[in-house]
Amino acid sequence: MKQSETKVQFSLNTDEEEILLEKKRAKGKELSYSKFRYMWNEYPKIRKVPDFPLNVDIEVSSICNLKCDHCFRQYMDIGKEGLMDFGMYQSIVDECAKHELFTLKFSMRGEPTLHPRIIEMVDYAHKEGIKEIWINTHGGNLTEDMVIGLCQAKLNWLTISFDGLGEMYESIRKPLKYKESLNKLKMLHSLRDKYNPDMILNVQTLWSAIKENPQEYIDTMKPLVDRIAYNSDMNFKEIILVPDEDFICPRLWQRIAICSNGDYLKCPSDFKKLEVLGNFRDITIKDAWDILQEQQRQLHLKGYIKLSQACRECHHGCKKIKRTVNIGSQKIESYNYKFKQTFKGVGLNRK
C-alpha cells in the first residue's frame, strides 16, 4: 500500500511569505507547534498513532445559507440538519483540552457562523487552552460585531472561501455579490489589525475560478490577507473520479470528525454520513480514537477502500495527475484529480 499525495491546498504565497506565516502561526507556542507539525506530516507515513487526534473537525452547524455551484450540498442528500447543542460542545472542548488538543477546526458540512453562539464557542475553546482555533467560512455572514467578537475571543485562523473575481465569483458563491464580499474582506482585514493582529487570514479559491487570471486574483487579495491558496476542483454533480485502490488515507492518523448531533465520522469528507462510527454521548473522543478510528486504520491497511462507498466517492483518495502552475516567475508543483472524462471546472466554466 502507498500513501498518495495528501496536500489538498496549494499556497500562492512566495517562499518568504510562507516562512513569515509559519512564524506567525507558531507565535507563543513554538515548541508545541513544531511537535504538532512533525506528528501531522510524519506519523501517517510510519503508521504511528498519536495519543489523541491532532485535529478535531467540529460541525457546530450542518446548515448553510448559500447554494454554491460546486458544493456537495447541491448534489447529495446529507440528511437531517441542525445546530450543535452548546452543552455538548462544552463537553467536547473539555475533553479536548484535557488531552491537549492542538487544533479545533469549525468546518465540515455546514456554515459555522450560522450558529448563534459561535463567538462564545471560540471564546470557550480559547479559555480552556486549545492551542489553535480555526474557522472555515464563506464569509457572507460576517458583520462588524461578529468579526470584533471573534477577534476578542482570540480566534487563531480564519479561512474565507473566495472563488474567483467578479462574475466568476457570483457564478459560484450564490447568491453572494462580489463587491459586497470584497468589502467584507476589507472590513475583516481592518478589524483584525485593530483587535487581533495575530489572527491569520487565509483566502482559498478553486483553481478553475482563477485559471484565466491568477495574477489578478493574487494582486487583489494580497493587501487583505496573510495567505492566498487554491484547491483542485472537485466534481460532485457527476461522480466521475477514478478511485485509487492503493491509497491509504493519512487523515485516519491525524484527525476525527464530530457532527452537529455528536456522531463520529472517520473524516470530514463523509458528507452523507455513510459510515458513522459512534456518538459522543456514548463514547469519549479518546476511546473513539483508540478503538473506533483504530478499526478504520486497520481496515484501510487491509484495502478496505475497495469496499467503502465513502472512500470510493472521496476525491482525496482518487488517482491524481501532477500539474505545474506557472504564475509569473513562480512555479507551483501541484496536482489535479483524475476524472473519467474532461471536467472544465465550476461556475462559468460549466457553460
Image (cartoon, rainbow, N blue to C red):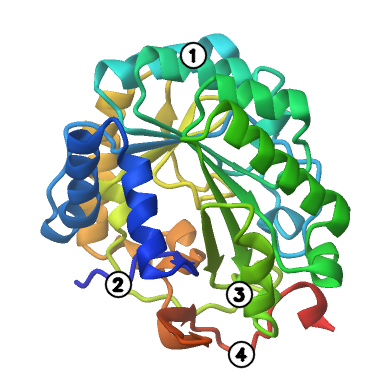
The residue sitting at 71% across, 69% down in the picture is 237
Label 2 secondary element:
loop
**In the depicted view, which residue is nearer to us: 83 or 172?**
172
> Where is mark 2, residue-wise?
4
> Where is mark 1, residue-wise?
124
Q: Find residue 207 and name its label.
A: 3
Q: Earlier in the sequence, mark 1 or mark 4?
A: 1
Q: Tag 4: Cα neighbours inside 10 Å, few (<14), some, or many (≥20)?
A: few
- Evaluate if marks 1 and 3 touch, with contact meaning CB atoms under 8 Å apart: no
Q: Is residue 266 left or right of residue 159?
A: left
The residue sitting at 65% across, 61% down in the picture is 221
Q: Is residue 90 something that shows in the picture? A: yes
Does residue 46 sit above or below 272 in this rendering? below
Q: Tag 1: Cα neighbours inside 10 Å, few (<14), some, or many (≥20)?
A: some
Does residue 350 sit above or below 54 in this rendering? below
Q: State how far apart marks 2 and 3 are (Cα).
A: 20 Å
**Mark 1 or 2, closer to the camera:** 1
**Mark 2 or 3, closer to the camera:** 3
Q: State how far apart marks 4 and 3 are (Cα).
A: 18 Å
Q: Is residue 110 something that shows in the picture? A: no
Q: Earlier in the sequence, mark 1 or mark 3?
A: 1
| Number of marks drawn | 4
The residue sitting at 57% across, 20% down in the picture is 152
